[in-house]
Image: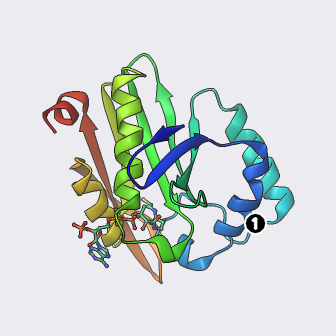
Amino acid sequence: MFEGKKVGLRLMQTEDVWLLFRWFNDQRVLEDLGSDHGYFCVSMDQEKTAVERMLQDRKALYFIISKLDGGSSIGIICLANIDERNASAELRIIIGEVNEWGMGLGEEAIKLLLHHAFNAKNLHRVWLRVAEYNARAIACYRNSGFREEGRMRHDHYHNAAWKDALLMSILDSEYREG
Ligand SMILES: CC(C)(COP(=O)(O)OP(=O)(O)OC[C@H]1O[C@@H](n2cnc3c(N)ncnc32)[C@H](O)[C@@H]1OP(=O)(O)O)[C@@H](O)C(=O)NCCC(=O)NCCS
């Protein structure tokens, strides 16, 4: 378990399927994720299969975000597409409990994961993809040290229009400059 001031990260396990089932069936949580997400209205069977696949993926590390005060689980964060040759990985985060949004918990969870990525896993670059209209996520990523590095034009279809996705990243040197 990695601990910050308000949240901690613990490795995801099979039993967490109940949490993911709830979060990935909440339209408010899914609304701004962009196309890459095939999870709209998942059944428990689909979610169990997804969790097994996630846990067996040797190029990914999934953590559950828990509040230190009370211990409730509020979201999931991961390093995916871990590329050992090039020392890079993709960061993904979802706070599934919507009443916990906007209180700095996402930023703290990201900083805990970046600490692990750069100080334990010796990564050089962590990148992410975010829908251009996901203003809360973009603000959170900027506050966590990510910089915009590109734009995927017409990346996905959202609310009857083509939307871009932004690519953002942080290098280990930028992380250490703080
Ligand atoms: C995106 C997410 C991880 C951010 O976590 P969070 O705990 O809500 O974010 P934080 O509180 O750490 O930071 C949010 C920042 O956005 C700002 N913000 C909130 N709503 C905003 C809005 N509508 N427009 C612009 N900025 C906004 C906040 O003021 C805060 O910035 P500040 O600290 O400078 O004031 C979380 O909201 C979430 O999981 N959302 C649903 C799923 C999702 O979008 N995941 C990301 C996919 S790429």
Between residue 39 and residue 35, name the one nearer to us.
39
Q: Is residue 146 left or right of residue 40?
A: left
Image quarter hosting the N terminus: top right
Instruction: Tell me which residue sits at (43%, 71%) in the image.
Output: 101
Instruction: Tell me which residue sits at (74%, 49%) in the image.
Output: 50
Picture coordinates of residue 67, whole percent (x, y) = 52, 57
Q: Residue furthest top?
A: 85
Between residue 150 and residue 45, name the one nearer to us.
45
Q: Residue furthest bottom?
A: 160
Q: Mark 1 sits on what residue? A: 42
Mark 1, Cα crowd under 10 Å, few <14 / some 14-19 / many 20+, is some
Picture coordinates of residue 143, whole percent (x, y) = 23, 56
Vertical position of residue 153 compared to residue 85: above or below: below
Is residue 31 in sight in this rendering?
Answer: no
Question: Hey, what amino acid is under mark 1?
Answer: Val
Picture coordinates of residue 176, whole percent (x, y) = 19, 31
**Figure quarter occupied by ligand 1:** bottom left
